[in-house]
Image (spheres, rainbow, N blue to C red):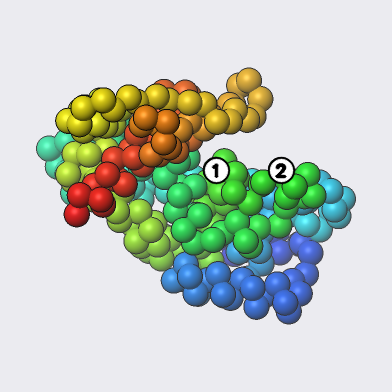
Amino acid sequence: MPSRKEIRKIMDKREDLTTEREKSLTKLAEKLGVSFTDWNLLHQALTHTSYANEAKNPHIVHNERLEFLGDAVLELAVSTYLFKHFPSLPEGEMTKARASVVCETTLAKRASLLNIGDYLLLGHGEIVTGGRQRPSILADAFESIIGAIYMDRGWGTASGYILMQLQDDLLMIENGENLKDYKTIFQEVVQKHADQKIFYEILDETGPDHDKVFTFAVKVNGEVCGIGTGKSKKEAEQNAAKQALMKFDKKEK
């Protein structure tokens, strides 16, 4: 098995960074709270396949391999956290808890808060169709960045970064909120008030048949209260209800 140093030598055969691009990546690294020794890794993490395909330059490396690595590091970090912090939680419940944290919706939200979309290199087609805000692209980029951090700084920094970014979602596990049926809870909250009608409306459906991404809005008396995405209609509706509950909670406070 090749060492990390040997892998980095292979990955270094790519397009050279411009000074302007490196300055941009430095700003992003400050937001991430991680310093890099190899800016090419972060550059690659933000290079979408559409950009590499349109450029037709063999030295441009897209982020799919780093995404693959980052996904594994992410799952291990969250799994380790759950194992240590919830010693009495059964395996099945740990699996559910982990799935609620590493899902596309959560990762895309974190990426959006960091404005990662602004730093992505995308093909023209993805740019004009809203690729910088697309949840699937943002979630993949979030995982790719984890892969880049792991390759550049190792496990300690990568796992620390993950736990820092996902601390709010991990806290929800402690409170048991991640396993709740948000649609039912939201319905109970709304029904406390008379004449309130809830309706879930599909807003978007993207991707091939085997990898669909759905976007739903939940409306109360015609007013949008929350929007959510998911790999299934059920997941998208649950995430829409979850967002609506968060808004209701803030109003009550």
The 10 Å Cα crowd at callout 1, few under 14, some 14 to 19, many 20 or more, is: many
Mark 2 lies on a secondary structure that is loop
Residue most extreme to the right: 56
Q: Which amino acid, by three-letter code, is at mark 1?
A: Pro
Residue 201 x %, y %: 48, 26
Query: Which residue is rendered at x = 26% and y = 52% of the image?
Result: 250
Residue occupied by mark 2: 129
**Quadrant assignment, res 191:** top left
Q: Is residue 193 left or right of residue 127?
A: left
Residue 77 x %, y %: 36, 50
- Labelled disc at residue 152: none
Residue occupied by mark 1: 135
Query: Which residue is rendered at x = 34% and y = 61% of the image?
Result: 164
The 10 Å Cα crowd at callout 2, few under 14, some 14 to 19, many 20 or more, is: few
Query: Which residue is rendered at x = 30% and y = 56% of the image?
Result: 167
- The answer to whether any part of residue 32 appears in the image is yes
